[in-house]
Image: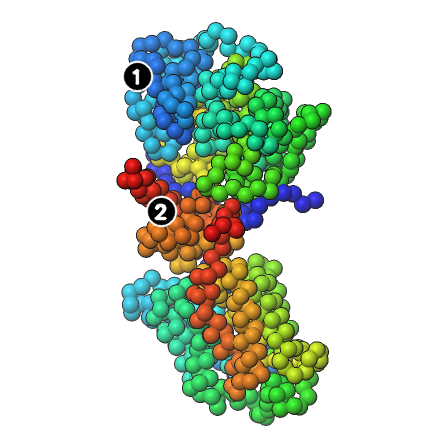
């Protein structure tokens, strides 16, 4: 034997799961919502998606090249961030808005804090909040085929009736990716089956939100009202794709439960008493900020040491 | 049917198909025999032979030098060539007795003579086990006579035979369960005779239905013994997980199995106990699986301790391709070898030659906080946070995060999508903490 042997500390086996596979799975899971959004809102929506993804990737590449870091574009996380930003855009925004959003998300929220795994907020959500605050008008104007109309949630708040079935299928107004509940669910189920995410966060988030709305929404157990709340706005997209973001949710199982309940309550509060359209986004950002604290108090007792001080 | 198990764990590629249908064949060594004086946990044995001495197979050549220590027995007859430092599979250098094998295998008097354990006192049984130099053959190498001497015999209510063999690729225990189930049961009965109140449980992962069937047949009519199938999952065979699956009791790092009323012994160890007591044969052989995609003819060998590893590769037909990595033991907890010029010891379970090294295949990247390590940890730890403490070399934080409860099974590292060397950093931190505790204890004296 002439060749030298590899030597490393055990274990010597590695699973096939890689960061890249996981990110590609998330991107794949976002495909139904993306395709539906483009179908619903036209080719301009596709332009928005291309710009948001393109600039997310470009920003990461340029920053890492300029700062002489290892270029991590190939891990796919920038693509996911870009996709999520695009899906959170109204279908009529000028293209510089998603561009600005992607640059902000990748540069400020992700890279300046140390790159993948280090961001303390979900970059896409932070970008959406940044854009909502900075360009409130443009970010909340929803046109379909040149006709401006209110989103179902706004209508619901105003006391008008909404079509829950249409909210489920997606033939309503809203941002590109949030309108079709069924498309989002398809992606969510794909992630569950592939083991990319676990049911804990989305189910508890949605459940606690529902309970909160039942208690304080003023409509009690009215199924019509509850399902409209459940299907409306960015809740589904947020619960399945943003709340489950690895980097910005707690790592402990108990922490994830607390986090999901917290998100449900915060979303409820913003929905019922807030004046802004981005209830889910603000709830998520606030939740993200509490993650380090939640983790700190939920480190589990080790096996065999439970019940001991 | 759902089988008993534990929370966490992983399912690595098990590779057992390569060698699981290959009967155990005896391998007779060709070259010199190397008997390290330190192949167990505890004080090294003391050499009781000198260069030039003639020795017989079964003769004690190294004597236990304390309570937690073990005898070393020659597995061949021949002449002591030297006593000199040699490297072990762990990379540790130990003083070793080198014996020139005369190929005649002349044995000490009385070796192999049947003996009825029911006519022996507990002290005699324990003395026989001690004399035979038996240690935990699953890997830890803890002297068996110490394990079988708890403070209170009556407090032991479970004697568990560990036939889980959860480590991928290994089939040595499996083959012994198929081929010598009677010997396992004999060994178990010897141990049970030490603990009047105990039940014997032979625990086997359910991916070995043949072994479960064979042993179930053999224990027919044995009132104190049962065969318990367990769910197949790594690390099901780790002591704490095994005890939990069998008894529901939870052991932590500060407790010994005996504190929880349990005695756990690996299959081959139990066979050795039976042979030492009932056949007057000390520990001179063990079953080794020689396998891996780089091995021409994967096999299970009954190998005399002291045999050179390189001979085993030859005996298994040599390499079909240049191996990237050769491991003593399994892929999860085994040691990567720099050289094959190391001896088979009491704790050697396998030689695994891999054509491709999965570790070198991936470049570690940044942690994405996905939580897989938390989910798979059989000790309920948060490896991601432990790693952060290791990176900052914050040993206090590492201890606070229950780092000392980690037993280095490698599940977190296996599952990590960022391919981070988690277990490796924990090993270093655990050593550092142990060293710090030792120094503190010394300072306190």
Please state if B417 lies on the left or on the right of A191 as rendered: left
Which secondary structure, mark 1?
A: strand
Which secondary structure, mark 2?
A: helix
Residues marked 2 and 1, same chain:
yes
Give residue A153's position: percent from left, percent from top.
Answer: 61, 85
Q: Is residue B71 visible?
A: yes
Residue at 52% across, 15% down: B124
Where residue A198 sits, quadrant-wise, is bottom right
Q: How does the figure colour the protein chain or chains?
A: rainbow
Between label 2 and label 1, give the one nearer the viewer: 2
Chain ID of residue with mark 2: B
Residue hosting label 1: B82
Residue hosting label 2: B429
Give residue B275's position: percent from left, percent from top.
Answer: 54, 18
Please state if A255 lies on the left or on the right of A120 as rendered: right
Farthest top residue?
Answer: B109
The image shows residue A89, relative to residue A4, as above or below, that is below
Q: Is residue A12 visible?
A: no
The image shows residue B75, relative to residue A213, as above or below, that is above
Q: Considering only order in the chain, which callout, 1 or 2, is on the residue closer to the N terminus? A: 1
Most foreground residue, B105 or B290: B105
């Amino acid at each position: 034997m002439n060749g030298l042997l590899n030597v490393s500390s055990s274990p010597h086996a590695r699973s096939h799961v890689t960061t890249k596979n996981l990110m590609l799975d998330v991107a794949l899971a976002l495909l139904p919502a993306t395709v539906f959004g483009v179908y619903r809102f036209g080719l301009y929506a596709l332009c928005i998606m291309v710009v948001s993804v393109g600039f997310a990737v470009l920003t990461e590449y340029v920053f890492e090249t300029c700062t002489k870091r290892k270029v991590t574009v190939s891990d796919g996380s920038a693509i996911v961030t870009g996709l999520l930003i695009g899906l959170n855009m109204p279908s009529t925004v000028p293209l510089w808005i998603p561009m600005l959003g992607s640059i902000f998300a990748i540069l400020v929220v992700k890279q300046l804090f140390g790159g993948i795994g280090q961001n303390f907020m979900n970059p896409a959500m932070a970008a959406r909040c940044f854009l909502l605050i900075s360009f409130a008008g443009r970010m909340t104007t929803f046109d379909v085929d040149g006709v401006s109309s209110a989103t179902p949630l706004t209508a619901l708040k105003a006391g008008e009736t909404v079509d829950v079935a249409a909210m489920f299928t997606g033939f309503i107004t809203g941002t590109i990716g949030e309108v079709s509940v069924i498309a989002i669910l398809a992606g969510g189920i794909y992630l569950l089956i592939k083991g990319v995410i676990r049911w804990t966060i989305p189910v508890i988030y949605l459940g606690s939100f529902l309970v909160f709305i039942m208690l304080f929404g003023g409509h009690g157990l009215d199924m019509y009202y509850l399902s409209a709340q459940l299907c409306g706005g960015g809740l589904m997209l947020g619960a399945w794709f943003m709340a489950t973001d690895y980097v910005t949710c707690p790592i402990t199982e108990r922490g994830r439960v607390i986090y999901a309940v917290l998100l449900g309550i915060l979303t409820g509060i913003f929905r019922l008493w807030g004046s802004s359209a981005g209830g889910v986004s603000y709830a998520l950002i606030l939740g993200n900020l509490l993650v380090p604290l939640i983790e700190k108090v939920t480190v589990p007792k080790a096996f065999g040491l439970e019940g001991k001080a | 049917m759902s089988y008993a198990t534990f929370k966490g764990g992983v399912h690595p590629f098990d590779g057992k198909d390569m060698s699981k249908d290959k009967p155990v064949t005896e391998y007779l060594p060709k070259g010199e025999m190397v008997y390290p004086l330190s192949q167990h946990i505890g004080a090294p044995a003391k050499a009781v032979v000198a260069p030039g001495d003639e020795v017989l197979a079964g003769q004690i050549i190294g004597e236990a030098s304390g309570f937690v220590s073990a005898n070393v027995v020659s597995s061949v007859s021949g002449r002591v060539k030297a006593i000199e430092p040699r490297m072990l599979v762990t990379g540790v250098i130990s003083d070793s007795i080198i014996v020139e094998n005369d190929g005649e295998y002349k044995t000490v008097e009385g070796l192999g003579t049947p003996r009825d354990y029911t006519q022996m006192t507990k002290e005699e049984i324990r003395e026989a086990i001690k004399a035979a130099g038996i240690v935990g053959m699953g890997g830890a190498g803890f002297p068996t006579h110490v394990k079988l001497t708890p403070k209170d015999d009556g407090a032991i209510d479970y004697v568990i035979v560990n036939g889980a063999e959860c480590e991928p690729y290994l089939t040595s225990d499996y083959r012994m369960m198929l081929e010598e189930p009677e010997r396992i049961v004999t060994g178990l009965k010897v141990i049970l005779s030490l603990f009047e109140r105990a039940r014997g449980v032979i625990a086997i992962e359910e991916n070995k239905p043949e072994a479960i069937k064979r042993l179930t047949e053999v224990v027919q009519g044995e009132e104190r013994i049962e065969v318990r199938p367990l769910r197949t999952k790594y690390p099901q065979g780790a002591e704490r997980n095994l005890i939990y699956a069998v008894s529901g009791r939870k052991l932590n790092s500060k407790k010994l199995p005996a504190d929880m009323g349990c005695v756990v012994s690996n299959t081959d160890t139990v066979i050795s106990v039976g042979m030492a007591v009932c056949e007057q044969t000390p520990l001179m052989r063990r079953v080794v699986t020689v396998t891996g995609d780089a091995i021409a003819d994967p096999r299970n060998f009954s190998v005399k301790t002291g045999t050179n590893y390189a001979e085993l590769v030859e005996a298994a037909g040599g390499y079909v391709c240049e191996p990237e990595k050769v491991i003593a033991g399994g892929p999860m907890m085994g040691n990567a070898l720099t050289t094959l010029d190391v001896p088979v010891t009491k704790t050697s379970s396998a030689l695994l030659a891999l054509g491709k090294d999965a570790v070198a295949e991936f470049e570690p990247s940044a942690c994405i906080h996905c939580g897989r390590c938390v989910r798979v940890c059989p000790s309920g730890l948060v490896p991601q946070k432990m790693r952060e403490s290791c990176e900052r070399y914050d040993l206090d934080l590492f201890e606070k995060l229950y780092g000392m409860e980690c037993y280095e099974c490698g599940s977190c590292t296996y599952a990590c999508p960022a391919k981070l060397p988690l277990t490796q950093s924990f090993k270093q931190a655990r050593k550092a903490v142990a060293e710090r505790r030792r120094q503190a204890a010394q300072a306190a004296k």
